[in-house]
Amino acid sequence: MTEHDGDAVKRRRASARASVTIRDVARHAGVSVATVSRALRGSDLVHPATRERVDAAIEELRFTPSQLGRSLAERRHAANGIVFPDLSGPFYAEVVLGYEEVAATLGRSVLILSTHNRDSADDMVLDLAGRVDGLAVFGRTVHDDVVAEVVQRGVPVVLMARTEVAGADSVRTENVLTAHAVVEHLAAHGHRRMVFLGDPVDSTDVSERWTGFRDALQQAGLEAPEQPITAGFKEDDGVRAAADLLAGGLPDVVVCANDELALGLVEALAGAGVRVPDDVAVTGWDDVMAARYAGLTTVRQPMRDMGARAARMLDARISGDGSEPRHDVLTTQLVVRRTCGPHPKEAHR
């Protein structure tokens, strides 16, 4: 073999080593890219048996990690993804603000995806998961199997306002106990016939509020409606619901799934000459700014804190936290204002 031939062989071997990526090592070892990255850094979070598999794969594939490769594998400068069912309205705005404020202090940019009225939402979320270092998913934007697939890919996931999915962290607000507090307050004022306005099918939060509402009525010995009055989350949905309520006869109280819905309902009832709370009491949920000016009785939930908490949880996972998934539940609080005053009979005693 000539000197020239020897140099060619060396170049081919070097080229072969260079073509092996950290993803190849992860696939060969049967672990995630993040695990290989942590093993390369000597992190204590990697189990000894797992480290051995990674080391064996590196030796077998003759992988030589570069500093650039490590940086890319750790994805320290990539964006976080956050997925919402919709971006309109004050509730989502508060959650996004809380998330972005924390992400900015951590030096992470944020890619926001809205799945509203998009048939390809599942594919869009999976595509986003491939372009970010971690994903926050709000509500029932995609099915559990999509979330599970993202987790399986090794992408850290934090769920907001959603039931738990294996392998993902979650943060949500308390709904059931506070729904009991709402009903107990209304019953104490003499209100008896109460209805719930919202759609439990489309929201974990609303489902829990509806459950708490029904259970509280039954425990108080009051008649509980068989079904909620189905409605969306927007003011226009509240306006449409007002027409149906007026046609069917007004109850003592309408407990609304969120503030926007309640504000639309109050406005439409006022336009029809119905006095709130003299003729019917109305409550909301969220405590958005408009609710405070409108005097709406509601439930205050820490919307901005939810976003901030999700951002911190995701950052911890991206940074190598290998502990068991966390499931944080944030406290909510009944806020009494003028839209659920005393029952009319009590007011005239």
Image (tube, rainbow, N blue to C red):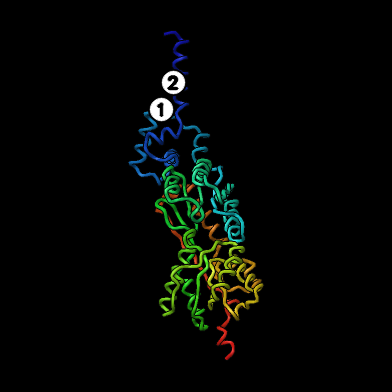
Classed neighbour count for the residue bearing mark 2: other residues with Cα under 10 Å, few (<14), some (14–19), many (≥20): few
Q: Secondary structure at mark 1?
A: loop
- Compared with residue 295, is residue 160 higher up or lower down, i.e. above or below? above
Q: Which mark is residue 100?
A: none
Classed neighbour count for the residue bearing mark 1: other residues with Cα under 10 Å, few (<14), some (14–19), many (≥20): some
**Residue tagged 2:** 13
Q: Position of residue 163 (x, y in %)?
A: 44, 58
**Residue tagged 1:** 62
Q: Position of residue 134 (x, y in %)?
A: 50, 47
Of residues 203 and 22, which is closer to you in this image?
Answer: 203
* Most distant residue in the front direction: 247
* Most distant residue in the left direction: 49
Residue flagged by tag 2: what amino acid is it? Arg
Q: Secondary structure at mark 2?
A: helix
Residue flagged by tag 1: what amino acid is it? Arg
Of residues 59 and 219, which is closer to you in this image?
Answer: 219
